[in-house]
Amino acid sequence: MREVVQSLEESRIREVANEGLGREGVLKFWFGESDEVTPEIIREAAIASLQAGETFYAHNLGLPELRHAIAGYTHHLHPGQHTDAWFDRIAVTSGGVNGLMLAVQAVVDAGDEVVIVTPVWPNLVAQPRILGARVRTVPLVVDDRGAWCLDMPALLAAITPATRLLIVNAPNNPTGWTLSADEQATILAHCRGTGTWVLADEVYERLYYAGDTANGAAPSFLDVARPDDRLIVAHSFSKSFLMTGWRLGWLVLPPTMTPVMGKLIEFNTSCAPVFVQRGATVALQYTEDITPALVRHLQRCRDTLIPLLAALPGVTLANPPGGMYAFFRVEGQGDCLELAKRLVREAGLGLAPGSAFGAEATGWLRWCFASRDLGRLTEGVERLRRWLAVQPGTHGTGL
């Protein structure tokens, strides 16, 4: 087995979740998904497809009906191009993570330099390393309020003509940090000058609460890019449509790259299952019924959880403008992996350790607030409050 594969680090989030196996009553906020099931109308479309016998291979790039639906959805959010022009740039993938891996495979050779903005979902760092790339990270910086911000001069200095690919995830998992349109334009202009590809993970685009854009979505590189830019944008049905287990995503590519991506998909997964694509097509037909309601609920979740956490002694965090996570640190606590395990064992509270997302996030914890029941969030904070109250090194006052 290749050494780089043997040396891959196991998921620290899974490590914490394993700590909770067999433990009754643990409140689980460690994984990045809602506890709400996929809407019935989507499930019914997939069932109808299976009952109709649609169990065969599909086009490598996805069903034309689904690609047209994605193109229309993209045009609605980013009207810079006509729907037909977007269609020629869409490739359907077997999940967002598969799309990201395909994008890296398409542009990165062994030995190439890849720059990644961190902290970030660990798969984004692992994927280029698996392919033998040299990875450099540019960490976000934290202000005194606990908000994570981009050090633009540091990022631009890191991207040189030797940089084959820049990977950036915004809205960001785990911090909620979001790029502005001006920042995206600056990054893209710099990468044009260096000949660097940009892989933008925008799966949380619709989970945006700042309300300062016309379409309600977070700023996108697609709004500032030309069709022929060296830009690949990754999306997923997982977050905005409550379809995490369906494993379906898509890429927006330069038009000349799309046919080549079809060949690469053939050598990875061949195609996405037809019944899953049928469900996704219906999801896009009802997107303005499904997604805005989901975002309103997630904002209620965020606005319930963040003030309660901020009121706890020794807790530092900022209100995230995007995503589905509260990212916070607790004064006086050490190794966040061990802290997360202790919270499972001693408080019945399941959170993800910040170190899973990069060394610069050591000491932080991620709390996924996508919960149907706001009471689970308040109960979780109460469990954390009681636990902190009896810990040395915090500002607890006892029980």
Image (tube, helix red, strand yellow):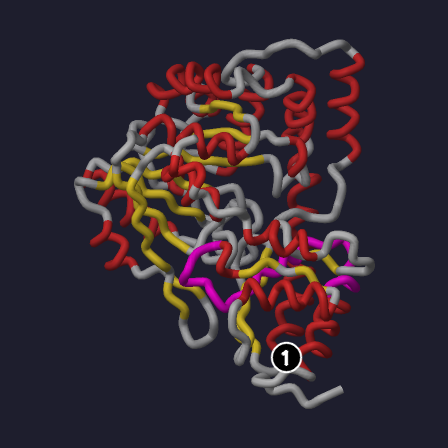
Circle 1: residue type: Leu
Query: Where residue 364 appears, x then y in whole percent?
Result: 52, 66
Whether the magenta-drawn stretch holds residue 363 is answered as yes
Q: Residues within 10 Å of mark 1 (few under 14, many from 20)?
A: some
- State the SS at label 1: loop
Furthest residue in direction bottom, as rendered: 397
Question: Is residue 228 shown left or right of residue 2?
Answer: left
Residue 231 counted in the magenta span:
no
Image: 321 above or below 32: below
For the N terminus, the quadrant is: top left
Span of residues in magenta: 357-377
Give the tally of numbered discs.
Answer: 1
Residue 361 shown left or right of residue 152 in the figure:
right
- Relative image position of residue 346 (x, y in whole percent): 72, 70
Nearest the eye: 43 or 294? 43
Query: If the image is split into quadrants, where does the C terminus sit?
Result: bottom right
Residue positioned 73% across, 48% down in the render: 35
Q: Which residue is nearer to you in this view: 208 or 85?
A: 208
Q: Which residue is mark 1?
A: 312
Q: Is residue 184 above or below residue 396?
A: above
